[in-house]
Amino acid sequence: MALPVKGICMEMCPREEKIMRKSKKLVHQLECAPYKMVKCFSRSAAGSSLNKPHILRPPSVLKNTISYLLNEILTITNIPFNIVYDFIDDRLNSIKQDATIQEVSDQDWMAILPPIIRFHAYAAYKCYEYDVNTFDPFLNMKHFHESIFKIVKIFLQDSDRATDKLCSEMVSLLIVTNLGDFNVLQQALPFITKKNTLIKMSMVLSLNIMNGNFGQLFETYNTLPALHQCVISVQLPMLRKIILKSMCAGFNCKNNYFAISILTKMLLHNKPQETIKECQHYCLTVIDNKVELSKSSFNNEVDELHLKKKIIFNVNVSTIVLNN
């Protein structure tokens, strides 16, 4: 059996790619001075080979490239974030491609994948209000899940790592990204231990969502790390609609009004005005900062109302994503 090829390219972008892209004017605006060129993701084509040592970057270079992308490029503010996202996403895919071709060790994957996973979790929130033609949330989540399922598989194969901090972060992040998903909960079961409080908290929340018990959502959300909040926030429109519909069925009674202030906390809105807008969107009557919870009035046919939950990042985003 042939041994996997080992990369010898010690730059972020192979020399021959630099020459080719410069000659064809394919240098991205985020690669012009003062920024550096980074190897593009490319699909295998007839007559070309992706496993040449001189175009493959060894793990150490791949890790340095990730640090560069998430330290220097992610923090750029004078270029629209969707352009920044597309650039980083492509270059991260190239990094995963180089690592896969070389069949890097599990230890290397453990260093390569977490910042990529965190980047996609953050992007899901950051690009939430973008038009689908500007940002594809489904493709972003596809890349997120491909990476996180791979690292969870590594944890399952290495029982010594199954209780460490990184495992707790990754498994719990997978759970809260898929609240109420029975299959994901099953995959997380082997990681339930007394030490993994973050996993247990996430699993209890997901189980409650699956069973229609939404009372814990507000309290749990506010105790979770920022990236966990990011992936929950993009699920809130769906959850808010379910919660309101459930409350209208449970509290259904003529002239039965519920305080907007309390509902704002339950629905994780930023301010009462958003809660009022949400209630009115579903045709519920709001009077004097109270909403009439009426089963007959609730309009289940309208689309979910997409109101973004604001998340406060106490440190620089690159620090969170790289976990420095």
Image (cartoon, rainbow, N blue to C red):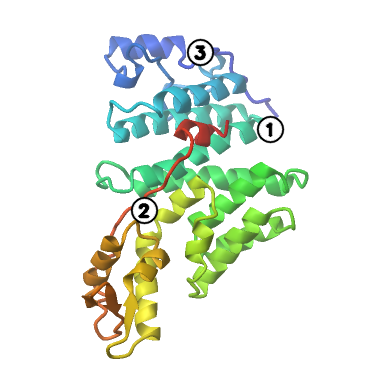
Give whichever of discs 2 and 3 has the lower sequence position.
Answer: 3
Q: Where is residue 199 in the image (x, y as percent from the top left)?
A: 63, 56
Regarding mark 1 in the picture, which secondary structure is present there? helix
Question: Label 2 is placed on what type of residue?
Answer: Lys
- 2 or 3: mark nearer the eye: 2
Of the two numbered discs 1 and 3 on the same chain, state the one appearing first in sequence: 3
Category of crowding for the residue at label 2, using alpha-carbon neighbours closer than 10 angstroms: few (below 14), some (14–19), many (at least 20): many
Residue 19 location, quadrant? top left
Q: How far apart are marks 2 and 3 (CA)?
A: 40 Å
Q: Where is residue 291 in the image (x, y as percent from the top left)?
A: 28, 77
Q: What element carries label 3?
A: loop
Are circles 2 and 3 on residues that touch, CB within 8 Å? no
**Picture layout, residue 293 above or below residue 223:** below
Q: What's under tag 1, amino acid-wise? A: Gln
Residue at 57% across, 38% down: 114
Q: Can residue 45 be seen in this view?
A: no
* Residue 137 x, y percent position in the rendering: 36, 48
Which marked residue is nearer to the observer: mark 2 or mark 1? 2
Q: Which mark is residue 309?
A: 2
Residue at 43% over, 48% down: 141
Check the image and report above or below for 85 versus 32.
Answer: below
Q: Mark 1 = which residue?
A: 107
Which residue sits at x=49%, y=46%? 226
**Could you tell me if residue 9 is visible in this image?**
yes
Mark 2 → mark 1, Cα distance in angstroms: 36 Å
> Sequence order check: which comes first, mark 2 or mark 1?
1
Image height of 191 relative to 283, above or below: above
- Figure quadrant of the C terminus: top right
Mark 3, residue position = 11
Residue 131 drawn at (x, y percent): 24, 46
Badge 2 marks a residue whose secondary structure is: loop
Point 27% across, 45% down: residue: 130
